[in-house]
Image (spheres, helix red, strand yellow):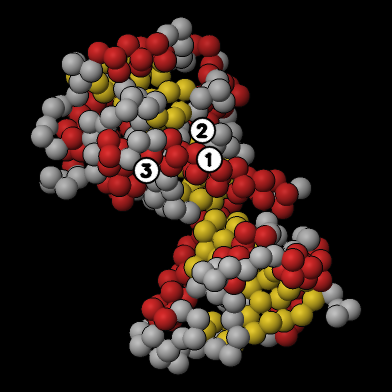
Amino acid sequence: MNRDYFILCEDDHQFTEHYNYELLTQCIKEAKNNNADIICGGVSWFEDAIQISERLFWTKKFSGTQFIIIFRKFYQKILDANFEEYDAADYRICSLSNNIYFIHPFISVQKEFGYSDATTRNDGTNRVEELFATTESNVSALKEVKRFYKELESNTVKNHALFDFDTISIPAYIINLPERTERREHIINQFKGKKEFDVTIVHAVKHEIGAVGLWKSIRNVIQLAIDNEDDVIIICEDDHEFTEDYSKGFLLKNIIEAHEQGCNYLTGGTGKFDFAVPVAENRYWTNHCLSTQFIVLYRKFFQKILDEPYDDTIIADIKLSEMTSHKMILFPFVSLQHDFGYSDITSIHNEQKGLVQSMFAVSQKRLAVIQQSVLRHCK
């Protein structure tokens, strides 16, 4: 085949009201200029996506091959790839390329026939329609986030250059159970010599449910911060560990800029996140993230935390993510969790050794790939 690309359709493909020929050709041209291997007319799921234009998104992983455009330079790579019995075409494609794009609003979805020749769990359900509808809504939300911060950027005066970082000292409240002496020694060493932090050790609340004790401890810290009239604080668990990417200037600059963007909650490193949208060179908005070993909280968020109802099912990182849409991830991470071989909060980390380190590694890898894509498309 001598053509630059061809369109591959499954027989359940269905054009949406957004399809038109001019739009399709424009997206193909734009994707080709970005060295695309694949363009999807619509996806039922994705992991990690960056909007590169009004109608085109880059993505790392997707599902849904009902309408895809395959470019010539990718032909041989597909032909040479091994395809095993339990492989799926969409996921195998994802493993072969970092140059995958999809069109939004979707110009293609899958029509429900009540059965599937490829995915038996979809038989007799409306699961496919629901997946496309949810994904369409998620992509629209990412567009809205990008638009919000773009408009905010044009109306924000960056004044962090006016600050003398050498004179700034941020209150850092460290949560520690008194009997955990090895953790106390570890965390004191982490902050040793770092005059940019005004460190206070706070005795953790002991509770038969570790997660409840952590939330009560965070509430105690917030009350202390209010009493001390703090404008911004750092809350650390005693397993926090600074990374080699940490520096005083890097952290303080991002804390100030995140405040200017209306941030309530900035994490120094996370073991898991959902969606990430770049809002600055080293900050990503996220709709959900885990891990509270090093978090930055701003004054306007303090009372909301104290007023939030909770019960014995409380999980601090999930609750904080639910409470505000104004949250960000700092990247590269300045904080990881040190492995002490046990956890007072999350029992699964006692059962699956090395799990937390694996989770942080996956998050860092995902964000590194996203950041590479951002840099490539924003030249």
Residue 165 disc label: none
Residue 57: percent from the left, percent from the top?
A: 63, 63
Q: Is mark 3 on a helix, strand or loop?
A: loop
Is residue 133 positioned above or below 250 on the image? below
- Quarter where residue 189 is shown: top left
- Residue at 54 percent across and 71 percent down: it is 85
Check if mark 3's residue and mark 2's residue have beta carbons within 8 Å: no
- Quarter where residue 69 is shown: bottom right
Residue 290 disc label: 3
Residue 83: percent from the left, percent from the top?
A: 62, 68
| Amino acid tagged 2 | Phe
Q: Mark 1 points at which residue?
A: 364
Q: Is mark 1 on a helix, strand or loop?
A: helix
Which comes sooner in the sequence, label 3 or label 1?
3
Which comes sooner in the sequence, label 1 or label 2?
2
Q: Name the residue under label 2.
A: 333
Can I make out residue 324 in this image? yes
Check if mark 3's residue and mark 1's residue have beta carbons within 8 Å: no
Is residue 308 positioned above or below 64 on the image? above
Check if mark 1's residue and mark 2's residue have beta carbons within 8 Å: yes
Say left or right for 131 vs 301: right
